[in-house]
Image: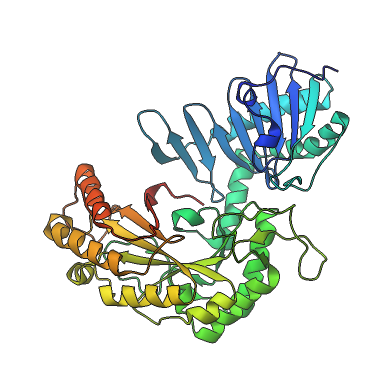
Amino acid sequence: MDNQPDILRYQRDRSLADVPGFSVGLQLRLPDNTKVYLALGPAEFTLTFSDDIALHYDLQGRFTKFVTLADYHRRSLSGKILHTTKSEGIRREIVADDSIIERARERVLRVLEAFSGGRCSVSATGGKGDDGASPSGIEFARPENAPELFRPLLELAAHFDIAASHADAASFRALYRDVAILPPDQYNALVFQATEGCAYHGCLFCDFYRDRSFRAKTPEEFVAHVDAVVAFHGKTHRNSIFLGEANALMLPHETLMEMLRIIHDKFRFCFGSGSRMGVPPVSSGNPPSRTGETPVPLFTGIASFVDTFTRRPDFAALAQLGLSRIYVGMETGSDELLRWLRKPATAESVVATVTAAKAAGTSVGVIVLLGAGGERFAEAHVRETVRVLNALPLGKGDYIYFSPLVVKPGSAYDAPLLSPEQIRNQEQEIRAGLQIFPKPYVARYEVEAFVY
């Protein structure tokens, strides 16, 4: 056995111990002289080939990503394939062709065949987390132990073909129907749907929930849903929880509190200094559950959308059960434009809701709709949005998202659209007018590229 095969290009400047989240590495040289590096993390494993192609799978064997130097394909749990290209700026699109799954599987089969037949040279290493412990809780000292960690994972991945992907997506739809949209910092959240659809359904610009009626789950239904979600995801890398869909926080107070208690009692959370929503705390693996029987992930909090025109929740009570962040679709600071958009909120209601949440210690994400109302409202949209954003008690740990208007075919929105250049200029004008210190995180929110 050759214990020192040539390292791959991406390994030359760092060891496995320098790669966050991975604890075990295994390098192979296949019979055709192809070098492959396998790395195991707490919730995924990867195969990186000497032609600079990397494959990602979760620990249930689901294909998640095919990466090259120029682009990558990511498969969502719903079966959608998001193709991102990196040349001449970042471009993203959902593609109908899912043959990338079979391309990945062919590579896995090559590795598994050589791996299982003993027709490859092997070397291995164990990595450490920042606290000196293995992030996945797995360590080994002898290279001959490494194959037994990866063999069952490769076998699972080898069975994930296009048919398996379609069946898995059908299971997802039976569980969720869909996850229409999440804020960007929650794309990696574990989603539980306390409600389905949108209770209002009247905004001129929103098509996320047009195909479904609003329904609130009973607490009994919610318990079953949470258990089914956990079973579907398996060992997950998701580190926050999102309570969906559009209007979960408008539920009656006692119902909402009961649902948060269900989550709070089933999962472990890390609150306090040193942790914030969306950033996993340092730990030596999954902590024990409250009963000490089953390891469960450590989550950084619970997040949810909130509207500002129904009922303002008791944020202090919700925060006690883990609500860490809310997201407000402000859209604009102009009341006239809000009325035109058929959104029954006001600038005053946005300020009141955000102020109440911040007073309870809950962080806030505010979403601004770029291009709303077209040229007719452009001047007022910029002016009033700047005014209201500066009036909000935002700061470090909060978010402001600029989301370009997307109008789907058949939408009721019929105003002339601004050009991409006009959209960029509008964003720059609003950004230039912000006078918030300490500054919140400010970023684009490209809704058309979202997949879960």
73 or 36, nearer to the observer: 36
Name the quadrant containing residue 414: bottom left
Q: Residue 238: image x %, image y %? A: 61, 54
Q: Quadrant of the N terminus?
A: top right
Q: Quick check: 110 above or below 429?
A: above
Residue 3 placement (x, y as % from top left): 82, 20
Left or right position of 280 against 373 = right
Residue 374 position within the rendered picture, expressed as x and y whole percent measured from the top left:
17, 55
Q: Is residue 230 visible?
A: yes
Q: Residue at 51%, 85% (x, y): give it.
A: 253
Q: Residue furthest left?
A: 376
Image coloring type: rainbow
Q: How many marks?
A: 0
149 sits to left or right of 283 = right
- Residue 118 vs 249, above or below: the answer is above
Q: Position of residue 386 (x, y in %)?
A: 24, 61
Residue 243 visible in the snapshot:
no
Q: Measured along the vertical axis of the image, is residue 2 above or below residue 67?
A: above
Q: Residue visible at 47% across and 41% down? A: 82
Q: Quarter-wise, where is residue 11 in the image?
A: top right
Please report the residue visible at 26 percent of the width from the left and 51 percent of the height from the top.
427
Q: Residue furthest front?
A: 437
Query: Residue sitting at 68 percent across and 47 percent down?
Result: 43
Left or right of 58: which side holds 153?
A: right
Q: Residue furthest top?
A: 32
